[in-house]
Image (cartoon, rainbow, N blue to C red):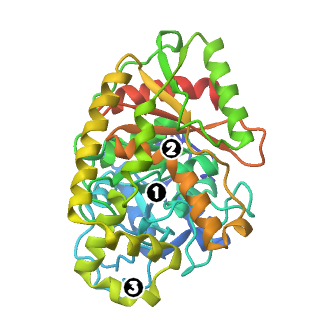
Amino acid sequence: MTLVGKTLAELARALAAGETTGRVLTESALAAIAADPRAFTRLDPARARAAAEVADIARAQGHSASPFAGVPVSVKDLFDIEGETTPAGSLILADGPPAQVDAPVVARLKAAGMVVIGATQMSEFAFTGLGLNPHHPQPPNPRDPTRVPGGSSGGAAVSVVLGQAAGAIGTDTGGSVRIPAAFCGLVGLKPTQRRVTRQGAFPLSPSLDSIGPIANSVACCAALDGLIADAPLAAAPPVRLSDLSLGVPTDYLLTDLEPAVAEAFDAALGALSRAGTRVETFAFPELGRIPAMSARGSIASVECYAHHRRLGLLKKRELYDPNVFTRIEAAGAMSAADYLDFLAAREALIGEVNRRCRRFDALLTPTCALLAPSIDNVGDPAAFARLNQLALRNPAVVNLLDRCAVSLPMACAGPVPAGLMLIGSALGDARLLAIAAAVESVVV
């Protein structure tokens, strides 16, 4: 049985009915990886097969760890896996000591009986949004091989589209789950940060890093979130589209949209309105302060700089991806006062946004202002920087505001998919997932 396009619910039903086994699903995933291994940096087929066998035996004996026992899932290259090094997409850490234990997120997947099939390709140190990494073979966008897959969790999305995993776990500091989901036509969840421990994941920005899934449906992401979260969500009741009030900011997040993205977004709003949803456009001037807040550097860049300096990594400049090192190095000029001012401005902005948006069930924007760029168009450093910033702009606002968000694929007349982002409130994840499931029924 192929994993391509399969939801976790479909696979769980097939397993329960005896129509397939964990070993069959794992062999299917390994065969797909063998056909194109570029989405993966670490792979242990023997360990994966052994995990599948354990899941099958447990199911045969009537005590499966979960309905998804035996289902292959991938994890990003920055998660600790017991006995393996954790390179985080870099050459600098490639010869580091092996992890002594699994990251809690990895351990929770294994405890549910899922087969952690391998670790996926990522932008170096998770610090760019297009999914390029000069240190490894480039995984192309599976919807159009001439284009980037998005990042930093690019290999995660590619692994799901190609049927190499039924779901993937990535990290999202400024869109690194949602951008590849949008570029590759998948669903991506950025949960409220505090809900999922970041222990055992190489950090980019402790203030902003979040851990979330990429999969084929909202229900898949909700199921994976339930497995990896510190405490499972109490499911929100299903919602009717006609009961929802969704807000659409008219400024900042809707500027400089690629025409195909703007057309797809307008079509999605039209579909929701026809379904009875109240879609209200509104001015969001508070977000216009973000560029000025970031003028001396960002939270992510200065926290990344500090961590790399503590580890002594900056002395190995020649081993970095130049596009990544440029962003890290620039943060060295940010003073402690600048950083503290940014944190204070962030808290003030969060309060203002919460007050402005409280009348909406969720906010709606395009996930990214552009479609996945051509690989040929990002080779120049200046072009890379411009397109990378445009890809990150919308999703990064969610992390800055300490909110949760879901990216859904939306019908697009362009050459590749576009993403529709629903933004919920902090700790409003269950309600947001229920809303996203309703919206998914009319826009995907």
x, y (%) of residue 266?
A: 68, 27
What label does residue 317 carry, if any? none
**Helix, strand or loop under label 1:** strand
Q: Residues within 10 Å of mark 2 (few under 14, many from 20)?
A: many
Q: Residues within 10 Å of mark 1 (few under 14, many from 20)?
A: many
x, y (%) of residue 334?
A: 30, 66
**Helix, strand or loop under label 3:** loop
Please, is residue 333 above or below residue 5 in the view? below
Residue denoted by label 1? 73
| Mark-to-mark CA distance, 3 and 1 | 26 Å
The C terminus, quarter of image: top right
- Closer mark to the observer between disc 3 and disc 2: 2
Front one among 24 and 404: 404
Q: Quadrant of residue 356?
A: top left
Please, is residue 354 above or below residue 62 in the view? above
Residue denoted by label 3? 92
Circle count: 3
Q: Mark 3 or mark 1: name the one nearer the start of the chain.
A: 1
- Closer mark to the observer between disc 2 and disc 1: 2
